Amino acid sequence: MKLQRPKLTWWERTYFPAILQGLAITFRHIPRIKKRVTLEYPEVRWELPKKYRGAPVLLTGLDGHEKCTSCKLCQFICPPRAINIVAGETDLAKEKFPREFTIDMGLCIFCGYCQEVCPVEAIWLKDEYELADYDRTRLIYTKEELLARGRKPPYLPGKEKPLTEGDKP
């Protein structure tokens, strides 16, 4: 099937209608310039939306133990394969715990699938967004780093135990 292109008039071939249309859009935005949109970061922080999905962290239960049961659902559901879990056994009632739990934040796309699939709500996307680093190897967070990040405020009421003075993150 061959498509016929519409015949352009002399005026349309000069591209003046497209240029004028673009200038009209630009001039419509000029009154908005008076509103300041630039923040003086890091002195002024932007207010996060309510449902903001930041970096994933591991939560500690109300009993003080880590919640993760090493079911590996988050590892299987992760689209970029950023999560890696090595399971170990424990004497607690949950039977298994993650001996190693790493998330490569350089690969993580903050999609929230890991949080949605976790049956014990052990992994959560908190409001942390400052993850930049010059070395990619420092973007691979271990279990201890993820637990420490999860025990920082703001706490999720009823989902985790806040860090007390004597606790070590």
Image: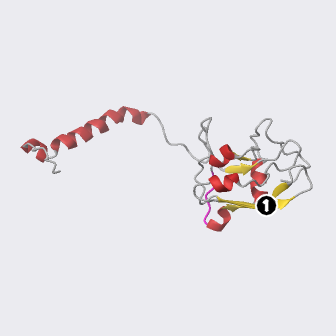
- Residue where numbered disc 1 is placed: 87
User: What main secondary structure does the magenta stretch of the protein show?
Assistant: loop
Q: Where are the magenta residues, as a range?
A: 130-134
| Image point (58%, 55%), residue name | 79
Question: 11 or 28, which lies in front?
Answer: 11
Q: Is any part of residue 127 visible from this angle? A: no
| Image point (61%, 58%), residue name | 132
Q: Residue furthest left?
A: 10
| Image point (30%, 37%), residue name | 25
Is 131 within the magenta?
A: yes
Q: Position of residue 52 (x, y in %)?
A: 61, 40
> Could you say whether the residue bearing mark 1 is in a helix, strand or loop?
strand
Q: Residue furthest front?
A: 1
| Image point (83%, 50%), residue name | 66
Q: Position of residue 160 (x, y in %)?
A: 81, 42
Q: Is residue 48 above or below residue 135?
A: above
Q: Position of residue 128 (x, y in %)?
A: 66, 47
Q: Is any part of residue 31 visible from this angle? A: yes
Question: 141 or 39, which lies in front?
Answer: 141
Residue type indicated by callout 1:
Ala
**Corner quadrant of residue 133:** bottom right
Q: Is residue 66 above or below residue 106?
A: above
Q: Is residue 163 left or right of residue 154?
A: right
**Corner quadrant of residue 20:** top left
